[in-house]
């Protein structure tokens, strides 16, 4: 069964921007688009008129607006929609389980403040088992980035970053775009200099060559699988979030990983994904990694 690209909408300009991006992505990948709106009737304990049917009608209107918005721009796309009777976070997490990727809107407040992700988006991204893409509404006068790289952050071993690199290469291949793979590094603390680590660094010719070798090894299987995708390897000393953002000012898509770990305080996005989601100006895909 073909997995759809699913987008959650709420009637805001940001969610319509997300629907438009999701429709374009579904068209590129040759898969259907599914539009969902979460609505749960919860009467309030206040003395005001609360009409179930009126609110249900408003929920259906949100879907209808999004459907018209995407079908006008993508007339050949297969589109389905549904009002999901659940809270927003629960509904979106359930949808994420069975889709190719989940797309959400994110409110933008200019270059200095960046993204205002919102608690719902943070909870969904932190717990989803499939990639989640956050899309902000663009200014009317801003040019649409028809060209540009797919920028991806690579960390750890080839096994650690397989899912995020695979997503980035697939996205680049679908767009006919290049990949810029970014690996940030910092000198390790003194206690981390074990004899084995020092031997590997010495064999590589130093710390920076060691990091470049690690990136090249992680990219090797994906270069082989996607030979037509041009790749730029970017290794730089510094904070991972800062290095990644500095490499992506004109990116069409920024792809980052999120470690799937159990935590006493619940699922977390991680510092690098958090920085990308709040400050990148392009769509940001967050991919769960082992």
Image (cartoon, helix red, strand yellow):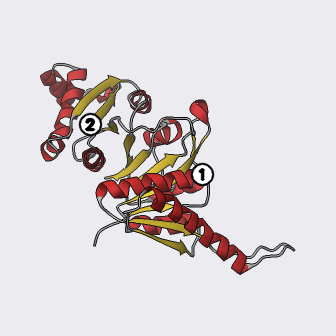
Q: Position of residue 124 (x, y in %)?
A: 50, 58
Residue 202's mark? Answer: none
Sequence-wise, the earlier of marks 2 and 1 is 1
Quote the CA–CA distance across marks 2 and 1: 30 Å
Dot 1 crowding, Cα within 10 Å, few <14, some 14–19, many 20+: some
Q: Position of residue 269 (x, y in %)?
A: 47, 48
Q: Nearer the viewer, residue 76 or 265?
A: 76
The label shown at residue 178 is: 2
| Identity of the residue drawn at 52% across and 51% down | 17
Q: Which mark is residue 13?
A: 1
> Seen in the image, is 231 located left or right of residue 262?
left
- Report whether residue 187 is seen: no
In the figure, residue 202 lies in which quadrant?
top left
Q: Residue furthest right?
A: 47
Frontmost residue, 231 versus 233:
231
Q: Position of residue 137 (x, y in %)?
A: 55, 45
At label 2, counting other C-alpha atoms closer than 10 Å, the crowd grade (few under 14, some 14-19, many 20 or more) is many
């Amino acid at each position: 069964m073909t997995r759809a690209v699913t987008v959650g909408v709420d009637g805001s300009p940001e969610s319509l921007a997300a629907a438009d991006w999701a429709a374009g992505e579904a068209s590129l990948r040759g898969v259907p688009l599914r539009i969902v709106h979460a609505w749960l009737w919860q009467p309030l304990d206040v003395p005001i008129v609360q009409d179930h049917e009126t609110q249900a009608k408003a929920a259906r209107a949100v879907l209808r607006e999004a459907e018209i918005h995407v079908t006008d721009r993508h007339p050949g796309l297969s589109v389905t929609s549904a009002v999901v009777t659940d809270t927003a976070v629960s509904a979106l997490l359930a949808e994420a389980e069975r889709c190719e990727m989940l797309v959400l809107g994110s409110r933008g407040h200019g270059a200095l403040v960046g993204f205002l992700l919102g608690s719902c988006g943070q909870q969904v991204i932190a717990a989803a088992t499939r990639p989640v893409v956050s899309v902000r509404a663009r200014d009317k006068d801003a040019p649409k980035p028809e060209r540009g790289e797919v920028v991806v952050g690579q960390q750890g071993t080839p096994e650690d970053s397989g899912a995020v690199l695979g997503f980035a290469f697939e996205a680049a291949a679908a767009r006919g775009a290049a990949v810029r793979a970014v690996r940030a590094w910092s000198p390790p603390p003194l206690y981390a200099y074990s004899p084995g680590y020092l031997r590997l660094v010495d064999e590589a010719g130093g710390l920076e060559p060691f990091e470049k070798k690690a990136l090249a090894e992680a990219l090797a299987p994906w270069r082989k699988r996607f030979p037509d995708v041009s790749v730029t390897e970017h290794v730089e000393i510094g904070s991972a979030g800062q290095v990644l953002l500095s490499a992506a000012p004109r990116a069409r898509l920024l792809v980052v990983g999120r470690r799937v770990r159990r935590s006493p305080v619940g699922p977390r996005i991680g510092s690098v994904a958090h920085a990308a989601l709040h400050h990148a100006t392009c769509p940001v895909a967050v991919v769960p990694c082992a």
